[in-house]
């Protein structure tokens, strides 16, 4: 396992789960919150060399036009309970959650969620 630390321009190689935990949460204790909270944002990509493109952008072509059609079809067949029908951002987040290519990027403060 390795972790690229782009702000420090170094690579840390770990050999066990415990060592990974130690590295990921080093200096992350937030006494105001009473829990560990990293000052980093994590992306769950399987390869450190992948660009930070959205799933929609990776499709290529005129993705802005494509998104309109994908989202229209998603909304047409989606289960609507609990969804604000007037919020495009809500629809995009629900569609992203269900695997539809969108313009959104997922980020988390939890390295465990990113993995």
Image: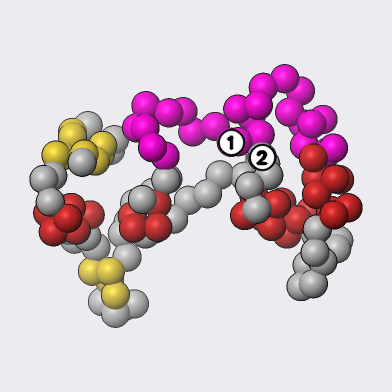
| Above/below status of 82 relative to 48 | below
Q: In the image shown, does 59 or 9 lie closer to the viewer? A: 59
Residue 54 is a magenta residue: yes
* Residue holding disc 1: 54
Are there few (<14), some (14-19), or many (20+) residues within 10 Å of tag 1? Answer: some
Contact, mark 1 vs mark 2 (Cβ under 8 Å): yes
Q: Is residue 81 visible?
A: yes
* Residue holding disc 2: 101
Can you say which quadrant of the picture contains the N terminus? top left
Residue shown at 22% from the left, 54% from the top: 24
The percent position of residue 87, horizontal first and vertical second, equals 80, 59
Disc nearest the viewer among 1 and 2: 2
Q: In the image shown, does 107 or 13 lie closer to the viewer? A: 13
The percent position of residue 50, horizontal first and vertical second, equals 43, 28
Quarter of the image for residue 21 reads bottom left
Q: Is residue 8 visible?
A: no
| Above/below status of 110 relative to 48 | below
Element type where label 1 sits in the image: loop
Residue shown at 86% from the left, 61% from the top: 86
Q: Label 1 vs label 2: CA separation?
A: 8 Å
Residue shown at 80% from the left, 45% from the top: 71
Dot 1 or dot 2: first in sequence order is 1
Is 37 left or right of 57, judged from the image as shown? left
The percent position of residue 34, horizontal first and vertical second, equals 29, 79
State the extent of the magenta-drawn residues as a range: 45-69
Quarter of the image for residue 31 reads bottom left
Q: Which mark is residue 33?
A: none
Is 62 left or right of 114, judged from the image as shown? right
Is 101 left or right of 28, judged from the image as shown? right
């Amino acid at each position: 396992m390795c972790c690229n630390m782009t702000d420090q321009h170094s690579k840390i190689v770990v050999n066990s789960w415990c060592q990974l935990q130690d590295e990921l949460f080093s200096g992350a204790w937030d006494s105001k919150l009473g829990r560990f909270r990293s000052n980093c944002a994590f992306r769950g990509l399987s390869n450190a060399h992948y660009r930070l493109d959205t799933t929609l952008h990776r499709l290529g072509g005129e993705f802005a036009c494509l998104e309109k059609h994908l989202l229209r079809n998603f909304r047409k067949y989606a289960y609507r309970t609990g969804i604000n029908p007037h919020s495009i951002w809500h629809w995009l987040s629900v569609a992203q959650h269900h695997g539809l290519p969108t313009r959104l990027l997922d980020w988390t403060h939890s390295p465990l969620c990113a993995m």
